[in-house]
Image: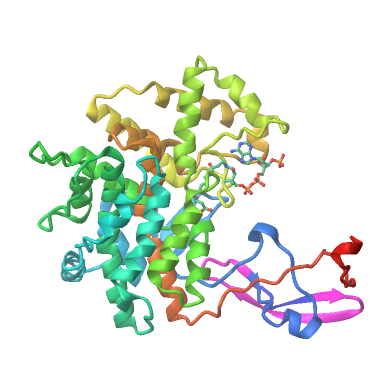
């Protein structure tokens, strides 16, 4: 493969080095383009533009491949637990038992959130969307952990990372319990990481907490499946905010806000609302398929399509099977699951979807499991954020350790040329 690429424009030739990744992805390195030619590139949505080199997650959208640090998502979902995967994503290797135990102990030491934070939570109306609450609380953590802001050494980064891995699940649980009008608690540091999240979320003040392995295993798998996904919208947000050295907590808070959008992580909530709407409308999936294809109708089939996957999202396959298993184990029959399967079948046979390579993505079935676990619909994207936390952290750490430059894209100006000011009396 050639190691250089040539751009020819206006009779001039410009040569650029070519970077080839470990999975043979080819990129033209245009770092010198504007300095040498005065020309920039234009790529709305960055569909063709790499923002960085990264060693964390590999996706092959055409083949439906997803690997974290070289391990397939299928193996990790089957054989690892979420904290182990978090360690792998952040530090690059699967931990030994003693490394994992130390990581967990360091997290347990930081798993108390300042009581003053409850006053911030209390200031929100119950109607507040949990993603807005979580983004605000994550940013508010900065005020109570100032040493986590200006971190430049690996050691200081580790301390900030452990604080966030410890306190974020508490904020997630508090966000849920605030909505449900339940007292806030701190869980139990004798439990596993995900079991503790489940206990903080689901424990009722008047009942003894009973461990439910089905719930914990389902949550653990869902969190692993959401843990990272290379340079998606929210991760790119975390990286660009982090590139100004704004600090880890501020960068993650920005990522939460980006994930909230219905075109991104907010889709898991939008999918269930869509499926409920179809159910309420008599379950006529054909009508909604027609709406999804109608260019004059803003309706899209939520949970379908993906910027990168032009084949099945491997996570959707795993989640679809997990939905059957969890509902079966819990003895739940959810008509919405049947509507989802009917829609999937129709879409996979429909030319519009086939031509555009639109397949179910990670958000299409995940909400059905969350519902079966009695997680309110508005909390679905918060669960996505809980899963994505280690991925965001890993990407932020990689960006800072590689001393990446501050993100600052260029633009093509299409506004007015210079013109003289006109006094208001003459306008
Ligand atoms: C996530 O990037 C990541 O990795 C994200 C994520 C992660 O783990 O971080 O995987 C998580 O965000 C998954 C995606 C969740 N969003 C949804 O399910 C919302 C519904 N999907 C679409 O809005 C859309 O598919 C996107 C936003 C996901 C992708 O949009 P693109 O890549 O910009 O594609 P596009 O909008 O240019 O669509 C191409 C064509 C268009 O039709 P034409 O103009 O070519 O005729 O496909 C059509 C679109 O109208 N299309 C759909 C559709 N998705 C795309 N038509 C109907 N229903 C849909 N869902």
Range of the magenta residues? 7-26
The residue furthest top is 282
Q: Is residue 48 visible?
A: yes
Could you tell me which residue is drawn at 78 percent across and 67 percent down? Answer: 412
Image quarter where the C terminus lies is bottom right
Taking the image as shown, residue 220 lies to the left or right of residue 140, namely left
Is the residue 3 above or below the residue 288 in the image? below
Based on the picture, tell me whether residue 340 belongs to the magenta stretch.
Answer: no
Taking the image as shown, residue 414 lies to the left or right of residue 264, namely right
Q: Main secondary structure of the magenta part?
A: strand
Based on the picture, tell me whether residue 23 belongs to the magenta stretch.
Answer: yes
Taking the image as shown, residue 336 lies to the left or right of residue 302, namely left
The residue furthest front is 425
Could you tell me which residue is drawn at 34 percent across and 53 percent down? Answer: 386
Tell me where residue 196 appears, x and y as whole percent: 18, 51
Query: Between residues 37 and 123, which one lies in front from this camera angle?
Result: 123
Q: Is residue 78 visible?
A: no
Which quadrant of the figure shows ligand 1?
Answer: top right
């Amino acid at each position: 493969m050639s190691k250089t690429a040539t751009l020819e424009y206006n009779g001039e030739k410009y040569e650029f080095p070519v970077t080839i990744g470990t999975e043979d992805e080819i990129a033209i390195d245009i770092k010198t383009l504007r300095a040498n030619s005065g020309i920039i590139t234009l790529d709305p949505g960055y569909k063709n533009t790499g923002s960085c080199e990264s060693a964390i997650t590999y996706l092959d959208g055409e083949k439906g491949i997803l690997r974290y640090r070289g391990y397939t998502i299928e193996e990790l979902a089957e054989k690892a637990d979420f904290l182990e995967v978090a360690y792998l994503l952040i530090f690059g290797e699967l931990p030994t038992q003693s490394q994992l135990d130390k990581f967990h102990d360091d997290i347990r030491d930081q798993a108390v959130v300042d009581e003053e934070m409850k006053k911030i939570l209390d200031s929100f109306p119950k109607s507040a969307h949990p993603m807005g609450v979580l983004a605000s609380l994550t940013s508010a953590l900065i005020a109570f952990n100032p040493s986590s802001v200006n971190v430049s050494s690996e050691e200081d980064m580790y301390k900030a990372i452990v604080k966030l891995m410890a306190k974020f699940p508490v904020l997630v649980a508090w966000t849920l319990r605030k909505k449900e009008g339940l007292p806030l608690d701190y869980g139990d540091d004798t439990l596993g990481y995900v079991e503790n999240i489940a206990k903080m979320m689901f424990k009722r003040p008047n009942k003894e907490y009973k461990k439910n392995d089905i719930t914990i295993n389902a949550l653990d798998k869902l969190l692993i499946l959401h843990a990272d996904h290379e340079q998606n919208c929210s991760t790119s947000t975390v990286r660009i905010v982090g590139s100004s050295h704004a600090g880890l907590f501020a960068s993650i808070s920005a990522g939460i806000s980006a994930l909230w959008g219905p075109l991104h992580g907010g889709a898991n909530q939008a999918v269930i609302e869509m499926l409920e709407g179809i159910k309420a409308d008599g379950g006529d999936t054909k009508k909604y398929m027609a709406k999804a294809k109608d260019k004059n109708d803003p309706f899209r089939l939520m949970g379908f399509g993906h910027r990168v996957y032009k084949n099945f999202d491997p996570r959707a396959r795993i989640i679809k099977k997990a939905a059957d298993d969890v509902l079966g184990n819990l003895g739940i029959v959810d008509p919405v699951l049947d509507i989802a399967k009917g829609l999937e079948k129709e879409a996979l046979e429909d030319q519009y979807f086939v031509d555009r390579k639109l397949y179910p993505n990670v958000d299409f079935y995940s909400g059905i499991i969350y519902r079966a676990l009695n997680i309110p619909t508005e909390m679905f994207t918060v669960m996505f954020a809980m899963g994505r936390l280690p991925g965001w952290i890993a990407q932020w750490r990689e960006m800072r350790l590689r001393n990446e430059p501050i993100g600052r894209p260029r633009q093509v100006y299409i506004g007015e040329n210079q013109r003289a000011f006109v006094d208001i009396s003459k306008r």
